[in-house]
Image: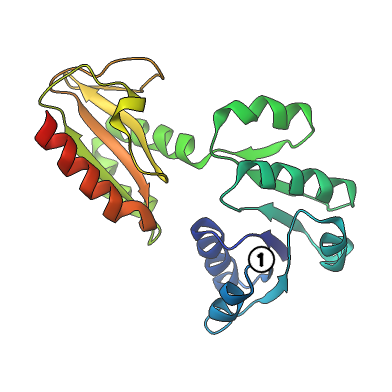
Amino acid sequence: MRVVIIGASPLALHTTEVLIESGHQVLIIEKDKERIEELNEHLDCAFLHGDGSQPDLLREADPPKADVLMCLTNHDQTNIIAGLVARNLGYERVVTVIEQEDFEDLCEELGLTETFIPLRNISHQLAELTEQPTAAPALDTLFKHDAALRGLSLAGGGLTLEQLELPEGCRVVGFYREQALLFPEAQMQFQTGDELLILAQEESLKALDKRLAELQQAT
């Protein structure tokens, strides 16, 4: 298969490596020229320099010869626009990744039917693992080099998700309260003893660890 990927995010690069190992051809569209030069040294794939949401560049990627186009930048709006342009240019399949669930209904209305929310998918897998304790070792396979899970046990309550002030690229995907796995809502307040599960991108880990230390001292 020939796969066109927009963006050189950690998710995009890991996906590229898996596709190459499986024998697929990959073309990455990336607007950072220096990033392309860096990746070209160790990735056996083709590159196009430019904004992947621009029609001319997506035409240059040759839609009729692409089996799948994946929009994997770190920006939801860019991914949505690129997906719409790609669909209009005749790409056979368009996969759009978004981080904000608020955009999911919009994507559906716009006809972007293959839309994925990575953090939500991982949350569901984590929840399933609580019901299958013998499958716990498989948890390691969920987190690659670009992601990690951190935990925080709250010694004090009253904080909301917003008040946690986690760094960009980090999200509370669930928490334990009295041995029950729950999922946080925007305005809810955490209680003393809640154990938070925080998923973070690799580049955000240093800032996250610093923030967690601050929260432990504060509570």
Q: Residue at x 80, y 43 (%)?
A: 84
Q: Is residue 202 above or below residue 199?
A: below
Query: Which corner quadrant of the image does residue 45 belong to?
Result: bottom right
Q: Is residue 39 above or below residue 131?
A: below
Instruction: State the colouring used for the structure image.
Output: rainbow
Q: Position of residue 93 (x, y in %)?
A: 77, 49
Query: Which corner quadrant of the image does residue 116 belong to?
Result: top right
Is 154 in front, or is 91? 154
Is 63 in front, or is 156? 156
Residue type at tag 1: Glu
Query: Which corner quadrant of the image does residue 1 belong to?
Result: bottom right
Q: Residue at x 36, y 47 (%)?
A: 200
Q: Residue at x 24, y 36 (%)?
A: 133
Q: Position of residue 115 (x, y in %)?
A: 65, 38
Disc 1 element: strand
Is 95 in front, or is 58? 58
Residue 141 falls left or right of residue 83: left
Q: Is residue 108 above or below residue 189?
A: below
Residue 134 falls left or right of residue 76: left
Q: Position of residue 195 (x, y in %)?
A: 19, 29
Q: Is residue 139 above or below residue 62?
A: above
Residue 180 falls left or right of residue 45: left
The number of numbered badges drawn on the structure is 1
Q: Position of residue 202 (x, y in %)?
A: 36, 57
Is 61 in front, or is 154? 154
> Residue at label 1?
30
